[in-house]
Image (spheres, rainbow, N blue to C red):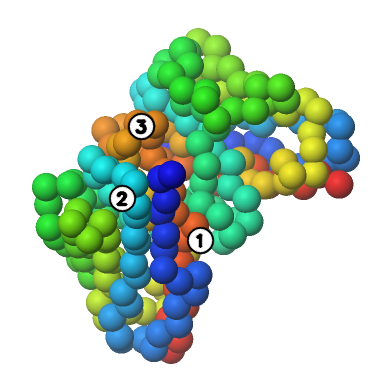
Amino acid sequence: SQKIEQNSEALNIQEGKTATLTCNYTNYSPAYLQWYRQDPGRGPVFLLLIRENEKEKRKERLKVTFDTTLKQSLFHITASQPADSATYLCALYGGSQGNLIFGKGTKLSVKP
Amino acid sequence: EAGVAQSPRYKIIEKRQSVAFWCNPISGHATLYWYQQILGQGPKLLIQFQNNGVVDDSQLPKDRFSAERLKGVDSTLKIQPAKLEDSAVYLCASVIGNEQFFGPGTRLTVL
């Protein structure tokens, strides 16, 4: 069956360091992958989209990579700040259902 | 630009009662989704609308859940009767291009 895994439920890092979050998938051939940020009590907010034929995408301090051979996406936040603390969700589009399938998310905590 | 509006924000009911959620998407967005997000999980799609037509309701528990989008704008999601396992946040999202814009959600607690 199709499966999406975000490798850790929680990640704690020090301010100024780079946060790296992982999203792995199996039995899936996504047309694209998205990353969302979700704060407590709020809906997810779209951050970045990367297509299957793209290796890397950047937006300000954010960088996403997509390796369709490894079936993995990495999400990086450089020079992290306490305000970056949130849950980050990866979502894949494509496959048999033709809709977004979300991972469980990784809760990032950036300590000052 | 106004975002996706949802109401109520919170609802507490007893099992076997019924409940309804309302969503007003961003103006002009033809595609609308309802998701269920259980604590500690990612959003799970319940139903997709394109204008006022249903595109995908394969994951909607149709014995108790129903949804409609009259006139292709506002949408309502109903649960009747509710079960304990329906406790979750119900999110509405409208879409432009490949980007989904989510509302704040309705937190449902079933006692």
Chain name for mark 1: A
Res B10 seen here: no
Indicate whether B51 appears above or below B41: above
Q: Could you tell me the amino acid type at mark 3?
A: Ser
Indicate whether B1 appears above or below B80: below
Query: Pointers 2 and 1 in contact (CB under 8 A)?
Result: no
Question: Residue A19's mark?
Answer: none
1 or 3: mark nearer the eye? 3
Mark 2 or mark 1: name the one nearer the start of the chain. 2
Mark 3 or mark 2: name the one nearer the start of the chain. 2
Question: Residue A34's mark?
Answer: 2
Mark 1 or mark 3: name the one nearer the start of the chain. 1
Question: Residue A96's mark?
Answer: 3
Along the viewing direction, whichever of A63 and A82 lies nearer the viewer: A63
- State the image quarter where residue A31 is shown: top left
- State the image quarter where residue A110 is shown: bottom left
Residue B57: image location, x then y, percent: 52, 23
Name the residue rendered at 27%, 66% in the picture: A74
2 or 1: mark nearer the eye? 2
